[in-house]
Amino acid sequence: MKDFNNRIDKAADRYSPYRQFSTEEWAKLRQNTPLTLTESELANLRGVNERVSLAEVKQIYVPLSRLLSLYVSSVQKLNRGVQQFTGFNSAKVPFILGVAGSVAVGKSTVARILQTLLARWPEHPKVDLVSTDGFLLSTADLEARDLMGRKGFPESFDRDALLQFMSDVKGGRRHLRAPIYSHLHYDVLPDQFIEVDQPDILIVEGLNVLQTGKLADRERRVFVSDYFDFSIYIDAETEDLERWFIQRFISLRKTVFSQPDAYFKHFATLSEAEATETAKGFWNDINLINLYDNILPTRDRAKLILKKAGDHAIENVRLRKL
């Protein structure tokens, strides 16, 4: 069986649409692109239990910002050419970058680092970041629909609102608002929004942003990913994802959960052993199922895959061939 699996893996590699780079190979693609991020700034961008170093930013994220800058310039040039061809001078069209991956894989940290680096390129100084968590249905709605145990699954999002937002961004509409999600309150914040006003680049980060839906779904023909100009999937082994999720839960037990208005304040009094078992339950009953059913199957739709090792460091980069 092992020999059979190895042959399957080799065949898959042979026909893979991706070109794989080691971290050393990828770092060389930086060329003379300057590092515009400081250690103190990076400290503010790291998520819970994230260990990304300035050396890794230089090795992985600076070359990636260079690649993305090339894509942005090409798409902007194409947009101008199409406008000239059609004779329609439409509004400024933002470049949209999607960032996908499992719970606890570090999507938000990757998105924040890229936002900072890309905003310091002279050609596109305005870079906005939106999380699709803000488009989750409210806790009241989820409870009414008996979906609290499916939070984070595709059906737990207000997909119409999210698609309308994406369509408006791509249509160049101004003064748009994206709702804000609070992990403290475990709910969308009423009357609080992020304003998105024709940025040069919009980064959209979320669990299911690369999903296209089931073939049997005849009602929905448009998906969030249809609006992306480039997409990144943050990948890791399932065992590492589970361990990181548990570690994050234990860390939150000592910080966010201990606040008096926290939704999960009842977890703050758990012992470490009890917290570990509780986190394992959440992982196995919700996040693992969502990963296998909805998130992982979309990995090979991304234009670039960042594969993390067990210490959270990027161990290789796969870039889709043109």
Image (tube, rainbow, N blue to C red):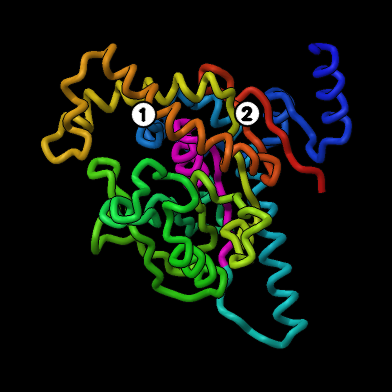
Crowding at mark 1 (Cα within 10 Å: few <14, some 14-19, many 20+) = some
Pick the residue in front: 209 or 171. Answer: 209
**Snapshot quadrant of residue 280:** top left
The x and y percentages for residue 309 are 58, 20
Label located before the other in sequence (2 or 1):
1
**Snapshot quadrant of residue 178:** bottom left
Q: Amino acid at mark 2?
A: Lys
Is residue 90 depicted above or below 97 in this figure?
below
* Residue at 63% across, 48% down: 231
Q: Amino acid at mark 1?
A: Val
The x and y percentages for residue 126 are 48, 59
Q: Is residue 224 left or right of residue 242?
A: right
**Snapshot quadrant of residue 278:** top left
Circle count = 2
Name the residue carrying label 2. 307
Is residue 141 depicted above or below 280 in this figure?
below
* Residue at 45% across, 37% down: 109
* Residue at 74% across, 29% down: 21
The x and y percentages for residue 212 are 63, 54
Q: Is residue 6 left or right of residue 186?
A: right
Crowding at mark 2 (Cα within 10 Å: few <14, some 14-19, many 20+) = some
Please give the range of residues in magenta.
94-116
* Residue at 84% across, 12% down: 3
Q: Which mark is residue 48?
A: 1
Q: Is residue 231 left or right of residue 273?
A: right
The x and y percentages for residue 199 are 49, 64
